[in-house]
Amino acid sequence: MAVNVPELQPLLAIPGVRIGTANAGIKQRQRDDMVVMALDEGVTVAGVFTRSVFRAAPVKLAEARLARARALVINSGNANAATGEAGELDAAAVCDAVGESLPEIEGLDVLPFSTGVIGARLPVEAMRRGAAEAVQKLREDGWNAAARAIMTTDTVPKGKSVRVTLGDGDVTVTGIAKGAGMIKPDMATMLAFMATDAAVPRSLLQPMLQRVADISFNRVTVDGDTSTNDSLVLIATGRGNVRIDGADDPRLAELERALTDVAQSLAQWIARDGEGATRFVTVRVRGGVTSADCLKVAYAIAESPLVKTAIFAGDPNWGRFCMAIGRAGAEVDPGRVALYLDDVCIARNGMVADGYQEADAARVMAQSELTVLVDLGLGSAEEWVWTCDFSYDYVKINAEYRS
């Protein structure tokens, strides 16, 4: 069960985006598994995609078509990855079905996104029917339904909306995401879609999205595995009363803060809903010579199976943290390292801290949320990563993933 993920609230519509969902029976029959997002003419779209060399067919098509996007088609249950040229043709066929149902656009205007089992062909005919059905259901308030339809092993849907005042106008931001396993994004997250009614040219939207991703989705890891399908899309419809034309407009930074707020919440919820997770963990590393060193240490801790299983057991076996720090590949002087669990100092100068009582650390480890803080004592850099523990259920979920 997800660790303190809030119940999905009604998400705010973004004028210029209409959403419909349908059940194509790709992997399950109980809920919708396809989404179509139709975009008004004149919207701008930015995206960041997985850097995996095994990137899926829909990723290739979506990135190539980004500049002309007028619709998105999303499915869960099948990743359409490791399917070669046939997979690209399958994805294109599903896009064509959307184009046929929306006479104002062509199939080449449609961006495909898929998540699920790797190595299997899409059930194209069923998805063509699903796409047509989803188009018939298009509506501006379809974000909540979409958040549920893109789920795979997620236990809860993930979505957030904010409304902020920028200068003399109001801006709305809504985002949804899915992800629970195979999570160590190398650009964004498995699948995430955000939209705002502000007008922003793509020359500003694309670099802003990358900056947002770098301090949100790129700071979360469940198991250290990067998906073949990672995709993050940002849509600026321009249907609100705020128009940003230049990088020197102070409202651009304010909009970026609002987008970051939504993106960081979604990223945290992915870690909180990690497969089988019972604890949410923030790993914070300070005192590094560089930010890169801090992130190496943070990820080494967050992805260590020995650390993660100890956290699941509530066992303050602090030697496992030392092990992870030592193999991180960062500049580290063991004699200057300090380690904390929340406010409990376990080690100082590379050795057990004076006055340390294991019962104090065990109290922290028993909590559903905790912070692991490492002070490298070498510099002023500081970074963080969000993660979760490894429980018995993580193994069970992934052992039975295709059953």
Image (cartoon, rainbow, N blue to C red):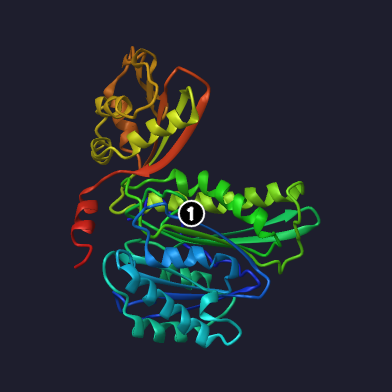
- Along the line of sight, the residue nearer the viewer: 138 or 72: 72
Q: Is residue 270 visible?
A: yes
**x, y (%) of residue 337?**
38, 18
What residue is shown with label 1?
266
Residue 69 appears left or right of 123: right
x 53%, y 52%: residue: 263
**x, y (%) of residue 266?**
48, 54
Numbered disc total: 1
Above or below — where is 344 with respect to 132?
above
**x, y (%) of residue 127?**
38, 81
Above or below — where is 392 with respect to 293?
below
Above or below — where is 91 with respect to 56?
below
Above or below — where is 36 with respect to 186?
below
Crowd band around label 1 with a 10 angstrom C-alpha radius: few (<14), some (14–19), many (20+): many
Q: Quadrant of the N terminus?
A: bottom left
Q: Is residue 136 visible?
A: no
- Along the line of sight, the residue nearer the viewer: 81 or 327: 81
**x, y (%) of residue 370?**
39, 37
Q: Tell me the amino acid under the disc marked 1.
A: Leu
Secondary element at tag 1:
helix
* Residue 350 placement: quadrant: top left
* Residue 200 placement: quadrant: bottom right
x 76%, y 60%: residue: 243
x 46%, y 36%: residue: 384
Q: Quadrant of the C terminus?
A: bottom left
* Residue 91 placement: quadrant: bottom left
